Image (cartoon, rainbow, N blue to C red):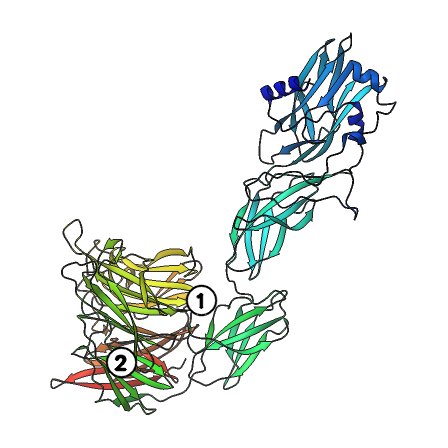
Amino acid sequence: MKKIIALLLSAVLSVNAIQPVCAEYAAASMQPTALQEDGSTLQAQPQERGSIASVTPDQPQKRDSIPPVTPDQAAKSRAAQEEEFTFEFVSDEPYWKEYYRLDSTDNSCSIAYFCENKGSSPVTFSVSSTNTDVLKITSGEKKTVEAGGIVFEIVKCETVKVGYTDIIVSTGNTSYKQRAYVVPARVSFSALKQTDFNHITLKWKNYPGCSGYYVQRAVSDDKFETIQTVGAGTTSVTLPVKWNVEYYYQIVGYVTDDMRTVVGDAYAFAEGFTAKKMAGSAITSVKKSGSSNLLIQWEAFEGATGYKLYRSTQENGTYKCIYTAKSGTITSYKQKVSKGVTYYYKLVTVDEIGESDYSSSVSQIIPLKNKTKKISCSQIKQKASNGMGQYSSNWSHPDNTYYYQSGGKLNVVCVQNNGNLKIYTLSSSFKVKKTKTVKLKYDVWGGFYQGTDGNLYVAVGYQNPKESRKKTVVKVIQYNSNWKKLKTANITGGAGNTFEGIYSPFDAGNCRMDMQGSTLYLMTSRQMFTTFDGLRHQSNISFKIDTKNMKATEANESYASHSFNQFAKFKDGTLYLLDHGDAHPRSIVLTTVSDYGLEKPEVSSLSVLEFQGGSGDNFTGCRVGGMEIGSENVLICGTSQPHKNKIKKISGFGYDMKYNAFLAFANRKSGKITFKWLTTYHPKTTSVTVGETRMVKLSDNRFAILYTTTKKGKTTLNYVVYSDTGKKIYSKKYANMVFDGDSQPILYKGSIIWVSSTISQGKAKSKLYAIPAVF
């Protein structure tokens, strides 16, 4: 008999084992299985990722423990029953298990049985489900077994929803029962989302009739563990999570009755998620309180047990904790500060699990009413700009003068005609107190940057006429604060951005650097190797440098060709890049790299100001002056011809048109562009010349723009302050002050300072200018 059954099974369906079920077994299947010692049913054991969930709560019953059929269940004795008619459900468990797929149109299934009629008369029996809302029979409800017949039959069914039912086979007064469980097949997630700095929320689709769900988690390919059990109807759970650890999650539904718990399928529906560093509460405002105090306020954070307030005088510099709030209800702190200094604040939220990441920085300055100063500095040897700013033609060039603070003193860095650097340390009265020479050998000057790590960085370049891939074409030299040479990053000629090679570094563009953590980002331009058309084209190119070992790698998040000016700024983990393009694209283009430094940052670009004219026409009628990042917007200033932004009803561009100063705002979240003219002189008939602009960030909500206007030989410096949202806050004009826009002014002890040189009788004369940074 066993051989016959095995042959029938192998021909129709594959099963692991056949559990004989006669009348005694049918009665036994109605008896409750043993519970655990604590009275609860056993739950599913952890499953390996990718494996099919199995039923584990039940323990197989021993054959000799099955009680006899009761009189009301069978009219014949056990001996007669076994002799004349035997019936078995084909199952590898003492119950039947089927799956219901929530989003499927096909939930068909089948139940197999074997029977033998040893009697002399036909036996007719019926198959039914006691709960057709869970499972219904679709074919094979009735069957007649002839005398001496052997039948292996499959009854076709359909699962309707999750739950349990009994499959009843009736032959006159005798019934055979098999408990059937319909469990969820592959509970799918509708969302996995990090909800705060140390929690993730999982959401999934509900299976009506499901008794509950096991929330399971694994690290990488490790075994899944049940970390939480939720009841019927629950479709979401919030869990604690660690940063930068990839977890895999799966939801396993289960059905419980008075005998056992049967679990559903988790196969192939595990999803991975890596939680990122995230801030908790946000600083809402930093305001002046009294004559020399700043009041920092933030939002209360649910579940917080306290906060830590950090401060720095550099936006991307080192922040130190200045205040610890030991209660989650404390939401402000007042601090006495020095006037004329910009302070940047960040907040860390603390709860029972741990600390959040830093909040976005918010800054403020209390203006200092300094005097306007013009001081002759004959000792400062500066390359004269001859009235030109960043742009000497259609494109910009690297600055030749830079400023930085160290040890409370102001320093001026000037590129000399012989290529060396002169560093002038000034006294409190802006007189040259100390001079240092740094000798350099190079072909092309790149730029200078004071790092947030306290070190100083110098970029120089070397021509590459043979288009060598191995030759060093750019050096970024690291010095300490005393100008002692430390390490050098070497960039070779084979570097590229879309197209290969650096033939000429810093060509027809600028060189900007900024830092986040230990990463130095350098954005510049280059003339590339000869391309397929036989020409050497120009484009932007960028590098990221690990300042710990000074190793440089390509970092081309944007591509613009040609790119005639470049700007790079970090704020709150986001990198902002700006290009002045004349072809691809022909516009001022802003590129945003969110979550910079992570494995998969988000990169997006938008045009701030589109230029009329043909693609590749070097003349764009625009000169970009500066870019700074505010709380809500990215601010870009410059001078431009009208193009499509009409002035006095005049649009267009051309060599015969005049320039006006502009200020553009790009919303950091939406990308919406707002464009404002700072001057509106007639583009064709005005006699006023508007010089190049520069921008100085005073705080996250105050930005100073400087530019000169010249009329009939008289020059006026224009100082205007705008808010982050585009509101004009303050303006003032200064007569007889030279500002060519050839260097980036510095905010120093409440004043905006720069050095300009004029040529008189063939000799360059340098002057230091200082105006109060008021608003």
Task: Name the quarter where the N terminus is drawn.
Answer: top right
Residue toward you, 350 or 148? 148
Q: Amino acid at mark 1?
A: Asp
Mark-to-mark CA distance, 1 and 2:
29 Å
Left or right position of 97 against 563: right
Counting from the top left corner in percent of width and height, residue 597 is at: 41, 61
Q: Residues within 10 Å of mark 2 (few under 14, many from 20)?
A: many
Q: Amino acid at mark 2?
A: Val
Task: Give the residue furthest to the top.
Answer: 120
Q: Residues within 10 Å of mark 1 (few under 14, many from 20)?
A: some
Q: Is residue 369 above or below residue 174?
A: below
Q: Secondary structure at mark 2?
A: strand
Residue 572 shows which numbered tag? 1
Q: Secondary structure at mark 1?
A: loop
Which residue: 15% across, 54% down? Answer: 535
Which residue: 27% across, 65% down? Answer: 524
Residue toward you, 352 or 74? 74
Q: Are marks 1 and 2 in contact (CB under 8 Å)?
A: no
Counting from the top left corner in percent of width and height, residue 389 is at: 23, 73
Residue toward you, 385 or 324? 324
Q: How many marks?
A: 2
**Residue beneath label 2, please?**
413
Task: Name the quarter where the C terminus is drawn.
Answer: bottom left
Counting from the top left corner in percent of width and height, residue 347 is at: 53, 71
| Image quarter of residue 71 | top right
| Image quarter of residue 737 | bottom left
Q: Is residue 142 above or below residue 480?
A: above
Task: Give the residue furthest to the left.
Answer: 762
| Image quarter of residue 563 | bottom left
Which badge, 1 or 2, comes first in the chain's sequence? 2
